[in-house]
Amino acid sequence: MSDTWIILGATSSMARAFARKAAASGAAVLLAGRDQPDIAILAEDCRLRGARLAEALPFDARAPEGFAPLIDRLTREEGRLNAAVFVGSMPPQSAIDADPALIDGTVTDSFTGPARFLQLFAPLVEARAGGTVVGVGSVAGDRGRIGNYVYGSAKAGFHTYLSGLRNRLTRAGGHVVTVKPGFVDTSMTWGLPGMFLVASPEAVADDIWKAVTKRKNVIYTPFFWRFIMLIIRHIPEFIFKKMKI
Amino acid sequence: MTWNSTTYSGWGRALKAKGEIARPERQGALEACLSDGLLPACGMRRSYGDAALNDGGRLIDMTRLDRMLGFDPETGILEVEAGARIGDIAAAFAPRGWLPAVMPGTGLATVGGCIAQDVHGKNHHHIGSFCQHVVALRLRQAKGTVAVSPDKTPDLFRATAGGLGQTGIILSARIRLIPCKGDVMVVTERRIEDWDQHLALLDASTATYTVGWIDATATGAALGRGILEEGETGAGLVPKRVSTRRVPLDAPAFALSGPVVRAFNAAYYRRVPARGRTVVKPIADFFFPLDKIHDWNRLYGKRGFHQFQCVVPLAAAPALRQMLESVAASGLASPLAVLKRMGPGRAGFLSFPMEGYTLAVDFPNRDEARALIARLQAMTAAAGGRIYFAKDSLARGTDAAAMYPELADWRAQVAKADPGRRLATDMVRRLNLRSEA
Ligand SMILES: Cc1cc2nc3c(=O)[nH]c(=O)nc-3n(C[C@H](O)[C@H](O)[C@H](O)COP(=O)(O)OP(=O)(O)OC[C@H]3O[C@@H](n4cnc5c(N)ncnc54)[C@H](O)[C@@H]3O)c2cc1C
């Protein structure tokens, strides 16, 4: 079966690692994001790693008028269509406190932009009776914390959206994987204090790829974050509200 | 954040530096890091000493600029960003019948690091050094990006090949891949009983890839005993996948103490039956045996370790034997010791290789070991040989000048390439490489 993956937010290091996995499997990869020259470089890299086809396409979560052309491009590929969403933005909470208007952009990048794209994508999965959506959320979406609760709430919204989408696409033979990474060694976390148990983007991509093949619903990556978040979610609110973690 | 303020080291972990490191993921981000001027670059910091350290200053980590930019199946020429790792290239291309012409003993080394040290592989005696297969490269200098190639800019090329990053940041390179039969290795392993047999077998070997493991703890009649490995690429056989393991903690000091190493080496030697054997392995297991154990440098504990590597001319083999005698008598060596025959191939003013024999031995970072390495360096110089910058963390400026006769040519080119002296690293300062001391 010939697979096609559209990868949104393709310049992120996690997306790069995932695109390479898809490429090595021989899939077609449509790499979408804002920095076109950079994505063109990744496209050639994916071709050389075995992608049946690799193309750079423009995608900006804040410019929904660009979504329909992507869907048109996807429909020109035969076989199973899949989407992986790696977009999101995390301004420091202090910047948001100073300028609440930043909330709109954060929510658009991390939740509503990708969700609007996936609303257009879902009918393709239904029409072809198969295909997988990978949505990358965050452990930050599991509980609101003082340090990044706007980003966290956007991701929480995205998690809930993905769960509903899974409910919908399962009926048509499609599948949705929700990915909740812990700390990953990306440009977003580079040099941040307080990082521990940091995973490489390649390890995360391996986990995601396995979750896709095994049709997992919700994964934490690395896996132990499932237990860390289990504990964090179960701290009673009257204690949690006084904690600084 | 762009700048990560951190303490870091080379692979040997004996020398440390403090400073800020940026790790750009896109070419645009790299340019932004250089807005205040040029900075030295590093790859995976698999050099043992301080070649990739800049204490008190800033450093650019190139490992995320690691994409393949183009491949021409007619010529086998691959264009890659400097941060691409040799093992990744091998894994992607070997199934399609291509391998990097030269691969060092770790697949984690980047193309930029391989150029800046002009590295050699197990086929050096046939095919030469890494940079002899570099067709062109792009260098970021203070004023912008320049194209460098052995035919159009021969002097700048020779200063860049093995040039420790002092002519500019290597952005990308066009390297020649060589055809291979597939992604497995057919390896013949033979016991070698002593020093004379070791050299004789290395001299006589006609295999494409040859390397000798040497038991650097064996003395007397067994001095120089080891295992000769000869490899050819193969196809069609499916070996099992390798899983990587990690050394989670710094090991205690006794882990590599004399008795432990002697016992390990004896067992390792007997692992190969007396009549020899032929085994089939994944290519990575043959070329990069240690990469299977992540962070194995932690086995030496938190003080770290040193590798001594020298090459001496063929005629100086007796001097090399004396060095091995000192090593074996000291009881300080670790199990990691290698003897290889080198051909004459080298591409730069400061390239390590010369026709002869090269010996590499690891030592824990202790006073006695440092004193022994100083003696070995002196013996190397006296034998007309040289030590390898990729491994060194103990030599002094005067040693280097005597061993690298083309140092003056290199200095002249580097003075032109980096007049602002922005690219100096800890090693360059320690060995006084850039100034006429
Ligand atoms: C287990 C092991 C086995 C090894 N086996 C071999 C072997 O068989 N043969 C051999 O020759 N070597 C061998 N080496 C040494 C290794 O190949 C070299 O040290 C190589 O340079 C490491 O590459 P790196 O990417 O880690 O470079 P680094 O160590 O990070 O940097 C090395 C030098 O290159 C410069 N540099 C790196 N990238 C750039 C860039 N983009 N632009 C400009 N300058 C740059 C740095 O400033 C530094 O001077 C081995 C090392 C290990 C750990």
Image (spheres, rainbow, N blue to C red):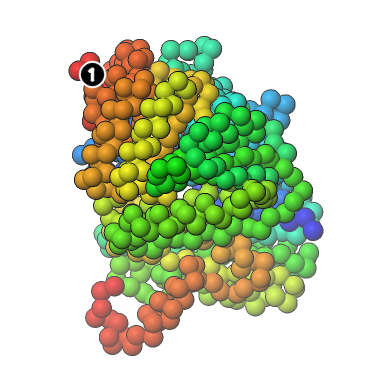
Q: Position of residue B252 (x, y in %)?
A: 30, 62
Query: Is residue A104 shown above or below B185?
Result: below
Q: Residue at x 42, y 46 (%)?
A: B218
Count of numbered circles on the image: 1
In the rendering, at what x and y percent does residue A242 appear?
24, 81
- B212 displayed left or right of A229: right
Q: Quadrant of the C terminus of chain B?
A: top left
Q: Position of residue B282 (x, y in %)?
A: 64, 50
Amino acid identity at mark 1: Ser
Check the image and report above or below for B310 versus A5: above
Image-quadrant location for residue B90: top right
Q: Is residue B169 left or right of residue B130?
A: left
Residue at 49% x, 61% y is B245
Dot 1 falls on a residue whose secondary structure is loop
Q: Residues within 10 Å of mark 1 (few under 14, many from 20)?
A: few
**B6 and A165: which one is in front?**
B6
Q: Quadrant of residue A196?
A: bottom left
Seen at 52% across and 40% down, the residue is B212
Q: Nearer the viewer, residue B63 or B204?
A: B204
Task: List x then y, in percent, for residue A224.
Answer: 45, 73
Residue beneath the point at 54% across and 38% down: B211
Residue reaching furthest to the front: B221
Which chain is disc 1 placed on? B
Q: Looking at this view, is B320 or A54 the one in front?
A: B320
